[in-house]
Image (cartoon, rainbow, N blue to C red):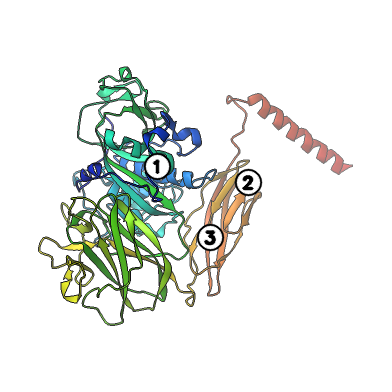
Amino acid sequence: MKVYGAIPEPTNLSHLTDNPPVTDSMNEAVNSSAALPSQYDLRDYGHITTIKNQNPYGTCWAFASVGALESNYLIQNPGANVPDLSELHLAWYAFRDSRQGYAFPLNNSSESILNQGGWPSISVAMFSRMSGPALESELPYTNAGNVSSVTSGRTPESYSRPFKLKDAYLIGRITASNRDIVKNFVINNGAVMIAYSHSGSDMSGSSYYNFDTRTNHAVEIIGWDDDYPRSNFKNQPSANGAWLVRNSWGNTWGLNGCFWMSYEQYISSAAVFIAENTTEGLKHYGHDELGSISAVSYQWSANVFKAEDNEKIIEIGFYTKDNNAPYTIYVNKLGSDIPVNPGTPSSPVLSGTMPNAGYHTLKLTNPIELQKGEYFSVILRAGKSSGYQYVSAVESHHKSGGVAVNEGESYFASANTPVSSNWTDGKRISNGPFNACVKAFTVPSESQVVNPSITTSSLPEGRVGERYSYTLSATGTTPLTWSVSGLPNGLSLSGSTITGTPTQSGSFSVYVSVNNAEGTDTKTLSLTIAASSRGGGSSGGGGCSSFSGMYVLLAASLFVFMKKR
């Protein structure tokens, strides 16, 4: 029997169905159904990655989150080789981060870590605090059986991050009223993560429909067919039409790893993940390590931080709890003494209306310079777009706890224009304590040069005769200059990327060096190049392989003969 692993979101998202987005993420009117095709398949455009297999663990939620993020990257970067992301990194570190307040409480203490299950907001929390996404090559799923030993002593941030999460749109339920909105998400943003109730007895070939309103499995919508016959389902829905869904049970299951799900199936926890290339030296400031667990009616929320270096704020991260929600963001510089509150907001640095509920990052037009040791606050005023009252996202105690709330970090206020006396510390709120879900992202100031540090910990395996490409990564002030030695024949360094087609097999010790104006960092990495897969024997093409071998032997003999002469 398969272990599934999807758990409902801890917060109720039903209000989102009654207040659909008026515009899309580019603030353009949401397309009408007339503009949508009756059939669509992301596979036709190369906008999903290969089918994967979660067996034997309940990690479907991690596979669905990562698959949606990879799909979005492919849409934004047509023709690119999307970095293969590690589902194991997400599923393990969500519950096994040793730092206080960083690990989600266990959903079932009698189950193993990889059978805890999860929901979209766990992925959002992990990615938004820059604890991933990590590369599959650095923590492959094949290590799931001994993950405790291979991750010992490492934080999730110690792995390479090929890109970061920019936005995550939380849709909640999918019904007939928002079906066209979901279709637009699929076309424009890639695969949509969803959760539903799976029971093998309700499958009919590659078609699925049941009447259960619970959820136990997470997958991804990758297309649809408005005319898919209702007669194909074991439990027949009232009308034709189905979603094309990608599963994580291998490509021999269902329809090449996919299946059809009736439009009438109960679907919840729908989410869209938006990828973004990260900025060199980017640093995260936030107190909500577990993300948005709940929401409060306070319209004002704020966090106070202390700058760790001479740096500048370039991005702000925050949540909106409803669609079409107005927001205004302020940043206060508070000096070198410990502040008593976030201060009174003056001129906003960002404002607008966010079409989709969820998590968002926005870039500042004018970065804000900070001095090492200087306190600063990020303040969010969350507006209302409907009758939904809980407008400010908070991190709060969930189930058995796990949240760390400290005095002097998060603040809330209800007044229209808060002054110092209006702020209430999140530690002391009667129905709390709460951390505010407001973040800042910084990079080093131009005047500060940071030593380089290589973050790549391993090189993926290659094969003789097959194209190889892998980009090295390091922190530190740019520009960074790379050099390598010990590469096998056929491979060379181009910028920070090892590329080429290897011509020799074996195990190699590759010496890697990176430097900038401040210093140098070095590391020795192991690289394995497997022999060519084009061998003889019983595999297809044996005649061609034998002929090639004879040709090589004849050429070698001729060379020896000519040399003797």
Tell me if mark 3 has few (under 14), some (14-19) or many (20+) residues whose alpha carbon lies within 10 angstroms of its own: some
Coordinates of residue 455 in the picture (x, y in percent): 46, 61
Residue type at mark 2 is Pro
Residue type at mark 3 is Thr
Q: Which mark is residue 524?
A: 3
Q: Which mark is residue 67?
A: 1
Would you place residue 482 above or below residue 142 in this image? below
Coordinates of residue 226 in the picture (x, y in percent): 37, 26
Q: Which mark is residue 565?
A: none
Left or right: residue 103 versus residue 44 is left
Coordinates of residue 244 in the picture (x, y in percent): 38, 30
Q: Which mark is residue 502?
A: 2
Left or right: residue 109 versus residue 492 is left
Would you place residue 178 above or below residue 429 in this image? above
Q: Are marks 3 and 2 in contact (CB under 8 Å)?
A: no
First reached walking from the N terminus: tag 3 or tag 1: 1
Question: Depth check: 179 or 128 in front?
Answer: 179
Question: Depth check: 406 or 357 in front?
Answer: 357
Residue type at mark 1 is Gly
CA gap, disc 1 and disc 2: 30 Å
Q: Secondary structure at mark 2?
A: loop
- If the image is split into quadrants, where does the N terminus sit? top left
**Image point (85%, 38%), residue name:** 561
Q: Secondary structure at mark 3?
A: strand
